Image: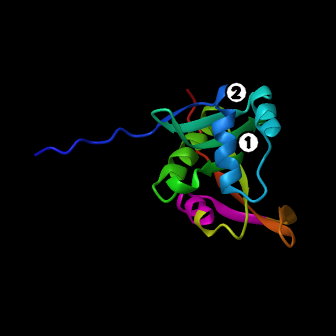
């Protein structure tokens, strides 16, 4: 007997109409979430803003800026109820592919030391710690450092 195979979630560009669903995830996932205005600014600036959806349900999203031969992953988030399913990995890989498309030689990101699952994901995708930004993130008890991570990309010329 053949079991039905569930379709994979779909990656697509973020649209302004997605912001209410995106903000529901952002505020559920983070104690100090980005504002809708920040996401609108990312769209206006032409950043690579992508969502992961299953049917009409938004599961997660990622934001990448790329310029001058490098890229920066600004935000990757998966809805708390959907985490630990490999969806964050799908988003990170899409953002890395987009960085290559933009001919970025390196990609950087910041991550909270208190987020070991994200750190493990980035390490498994080839990122390495390259520094620390002291007091970078707001935190309940003041500020939290950021681990700065980077990866060198092999960029294929087309």
Q: Real-space Cα distance between discs 2 and 1? A: 26 Å
The disc at residue 82 is none
Q: Position of residue 153 (x, y in %)?
A: 61, 46
Indicate whether residue 126 is drawn in magenta.
Answer: yes
Disc 2, SS? helix
Asked if residue 73 is positioned above or below residue 54 in the image, the reply reads: below
Q: Nearer the viewer, residue 41 or 36?
A: 36
**For mark 2, does the 10 Å Cα neighbourhood hold few (<14), some (14 to 19), or many (20 or more) residues?**
few
Q: Nearer the viewer, residue 105 or 39?
A: 39
Q: Quadrant of the C terminus?
A: top right
The residue sitting at the left extreme is: 1
Disc 1, SS? strand
**Residue 43 shown left or right of residue 119 in the figure:** right
Q: Nearer the viewer, residue 57 or 39?
A: 57
**Residue 143 shown left or right of residue 131 in the figure:** right
The residue sitting at the bottom extreme is: 141
State whether residue 9 appears in this view. Answer: yes
Indicate whether residue 117 is drawn in magenta.
Answer: no
Q: Which residue bears the numbered disc 2?
A: 16
Range covered by the magenta-colored residues = 118-131
Disc on the earlier residue, 2 or 1? 2
Q: Which-is-in-front pick, marks 2 and 1?
A: 2
Asked if residue 116 is positioned above or below residue 65 in the image, the reply reads: below
Q: Position of residue 119 (x, y in %)?
A: 62, 64
What colouring method underlies this structural image?
Answer: rainbow
Question: In which quadrant of the rendered view does residue 28 lie?
Answer: bottom right
Q: Could you tell me which residue is drawn at 58 percent across and 51 percent down?
A: 79
**For mark 1, does the 10 Å Cα neighbourhood hold few (<14), some (14 to 19), or many (20 or more) residues?**
some
Q: Which residue bears the numbered disc 1?
A: 70
Q: Position of residue 130 (x, y in %)?
A: 74, 63
């Amino acid at each position: 007997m053949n079991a039905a195979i569930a379709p994979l979630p779909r990656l697509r560009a973020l649209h302004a109409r997605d912001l209410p669903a995106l903000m529901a995830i952002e505020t559920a996932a983070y104690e100090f979430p980005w504002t809708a205005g920040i996401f609108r600014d990312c769209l206006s600036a032409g950043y690579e803003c992508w969502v992961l959806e299953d049917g009409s349900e938004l599961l997660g999203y990622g934001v990448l800026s790329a310029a001058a031969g490098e890229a920066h992953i600004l935000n990757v988030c998966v809805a708390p109820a959907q985490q630990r399913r490999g969806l964050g990995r799908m988003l990170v890989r899409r953002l890395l592919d987009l960085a290559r498309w933009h001919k970025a030689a390196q990609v950087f990101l910041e991550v909270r030391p208190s987020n070991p699952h994200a750190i493990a994901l980035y390490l498994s995708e080839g990122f390495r710690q390259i520094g620390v930004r002291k007091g970078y993130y707001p935190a309940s008890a003041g500020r939290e450092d950021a681990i700065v991570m980077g990866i060198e990309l092999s960029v294929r010329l087309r």
